[in-house]
Structures are given as C-alpha cells and as structure tokens.
Amino acid sequence: MYACMLVPVSFKTGSKLWGPFKELFYVVDSAVSKKNPDAFNDLEAALRRHKPDFVSLLQNPAKNAQHREQLRKANTDGIQLDGETGPKTYQEQEQPRFPGYSRGLVAVLLYYDGRASLLNSLQLLIQARKGRTWSFEIEEEITELATEFTDDLMKDGLTKKILTLLEKLDVVKELDKLSKEKALGDAKHRYDVTEFLRGIRTSLAESLFAWSCQTPLIRQDLMLLFNHLRKHAAVDQTGCLDEVTIALSMSYLYSIDISNVEPRDEDRDELAKLLPLLQDPQYLPDLHQLVSKDTDASDTEAWKGLKTVLEFGMGITLRRATQQPETQEYQDILERDEVLVDNAIQNNLFRFINNCIFKNKHFFQVEFLVRQFHSLFTDFITANIQIDACRTTEVPNHYS
C-alpha cells in the first residue's frame, strides 16, 4: 500500500548500528521496485546475511557490556566505522544532515530509520511473491527467491510476530518513554520520530495485507488476526478506521476470498489447492463459529462496526462456497450465508463502511482495497437478484 516514511539520510553503511538495514533496503528496492535484472546475486547474499534479522523482527540484541561502554564514550571518543582510519563521532559523520540536533537526537532518528528500512524490505519481498493477485513483472529467479524466503519466515511464525509487535508498539507510550529518557528534541524532531513509529506500524500491517492478497492466511493465523482485531481495532482522529486496522481487515477479507476459483475453469483444481479455506476441513467451521459470536458490552464501537464488515465478507464467502465441491459436507454452515449478511446489514453495515472506511483519506488511493469491496458488493447484488427472481417464480406456484 504505502511504504514507510524514509527520512532522506544516508548513514554510513559500514556502521554496526543502522547502516546494514539501509543497505539491505537499497538492495531489495533495486531488485523489486527498480526491476534491476542483475540484482539477483546481491539480493541472495543480502537475504542470507540478514535472515536472522527477519526472523527476530525488530527484537533488539541482548545487552552487551562492551557495546554499552563504547556508546557511553561515543560523545567524546567517537565510534570506529568500517573503512575509516580512525574513530568518528556521530556529529562528524551524520550531524551535518541534521542541523541543530545533538548527537543523541540524531541517533534516535537513525535508529528508527534502520527499523523502518528492515520492514520496508520485508514488505517489498512479500509483494514480490508469486501469488494470485498481482505480478511485479520482475526476473523469475527473484520472484522465486522472494517467495521461498518469505515462505520460510511465515513457517517460523511471521503472522504472530507481526501482530505481537503491533500490540506492543504503541506510538504514545513509545514517545513517553523517549521523552523520559530525554531522547526527544524540538517539535520537528518529535514529528519525525512520530512519523517513523506510525510508518513502522503501518508497514507491519501492510506486510500481512500483501501476504493475504498473494497467499491466503492459514486457519490458525486467521484466527489470531480476527482476535487481534477484536481487541485492537482503532479509529483515527477523524473517526475513520486507522490505516493499521484497515490493512488487517483487508488481510482477513482477502484470506477468505475464493472468488477466483470458478467451477468450470480448466485450472480450477490447481487454484483450489492454494486456498486453505477449501483444503483445511476445519477452516469453515472454526471461522463461522468465531464470526457468529455476538459482540458484548466490553467491545469497542470500532470493533462492533468492523465486525459487521467481517460478517458480511463471511456471508459472501459462504455464498461463493456453495459452488465448490470441497465444501458440500458443510451444507448447514453454507445455508447461514443470508443470516450473516442480514445481521450485518441490520447492524448498520453500509453506514459504517461509508463513514469509517471509505472516508479514510487513503482508502481510494489503494487499488486492491477498492477491488475487494467492489467484488463483495457485486456478488451481494447478484445474489439478491437471483433470490428475488426465485421468489417471484415461487409465488404464483404457491397459489396455483
């Protein structure tokens, strides 16, 4: 959707603290966004080198007494940077790019810039995956590498790691912590740090969204996502769902989307094998049970509104699933499609979508958000036309 804000700084890539993540982003960006046909070897080497960083995902390394002492003396002695003949202080190396900021304030910006670079790299790699929704039209070997690499990350619990980070990384609390440590400067410095934090959260959510567009989440991960949304769905200052909540909600909707599997298509069976909803026998029962639970007094208004969207999406999916051979043993669940849709509508589904999703200033800038709702509304209208047609033909027969 939107890349994290990257402050235009160029921290020395030899730095042991932030530079490697900046260098990683340049390599991934060259291979994926810039479609450099000669980038494969550099990308393969970078991913091999940074695999532990992707696996640990924003976990700071354990405290190290030697590093702590080095940092304590950094203001006066400087830090040795690779390729330099002698130690340089941060002021000598980077401070000219940040006039008016102390070395400590520059270090804070560079720290978050590095974290943003790692997550931007992850997001690009997931977008470059082989999948069902889009193609970056890059070299096949780069697509294969990105797919294999991110598959390994997902098997290692990427969904849970992303959701856990989103729970822990609260912008207000993070700013309070920095303020107590006297690590925030003037209004502009505070603004830049805030934008980094918001961008990091957005990139985490959008990585999961991009994954779901290309490859639906497995049942266990979708359950984690649903429960996360129940606890953490949030609105912004305008009353719209915030970008993180929208991205995660769309991840849910894309994960249960089986609209690209048409019973008469020649490659129908191959496509169906890629959809956990059609392959995992517990997927429909478990998800239906979760979605059918009523809200309670402890639920936020944001969740109550959002749940109508998730119910609506599930109802449309059940309607679509009636045509799939893998789901025929779940007739009792499939017949609940109208109940879910009607319940969502009665709880002001369309008002919520219009006021809290469509009015988000970024929504219509993202093609794949619009596409998903267009698909849902089209199937809803088509289904109602068919239902009305059946009722029209049934009435005369009833009274004949």
Image (cartoon, rainbow, N blue to C red):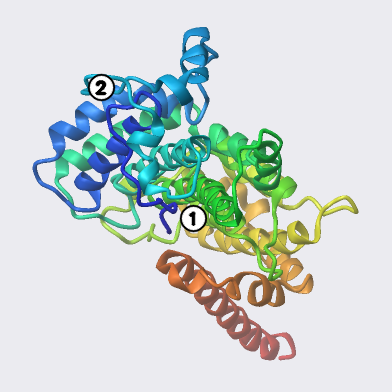
Count of picture labels: 2
Q: Which tag is nearer the camera, tag 2 or tag 1?
A: 2
Q: Residue furthest right?
A: 297
x, y percent for residue 188: 55, 56
State the residue at coordinates (61%, 34%): 164
245 is higher (above) or lower (below) than 171? below
**In the structure shown, which secondary structural element does the residue marked by tag 1 occupy?**
helix
Badge 2: residue crowd in 10 Å (few <14, some 14–19, many ≥20): few
286 is higher (above) or lower (below) than 155? below
Q: Tell me the quadrant of the picture where the N terminus can be found.
A: bottom left
The residue under label 1 is: 254
x, y percent for residue 352: 70, 72
State the residue at coordinates (69%, 61%): 235
In-front residue for pair 356/96 = 96
In-front residue for pair 181/303 = 181
State the residue at coordinates (60%, 52%): 186
**Left or right position of 71 against 233:** left
x, y percent for residue 285: 65, 43
**Mark 2 is on which residue type?**
Asp
**Mark 1 is on which residue type?**
Tyr
Q: Tell me the quadrant of the picture where the C terminus can be found.
A: bottom right
Q: Residue 82: which disc?
A: 2
Q: CA distance from mark 2 to mark 1?
A: 45 Å
Badge 1: residue crowd in 10 Å (few <14, some 14–19, many ≥20): many
Residue 156 visible in the picture: no
**Left or right position of 131 against 157:** left
**In the structure shown, which secondary structural element does the residue marked by tag 2 occupy?**
loop
State the residue at coordinates (90%, 54%): 297
Q: Residue furthest left?
A: 38
Mark 2 and mark 1 in contact? Answer it, CB < 8 Å. Answer: no
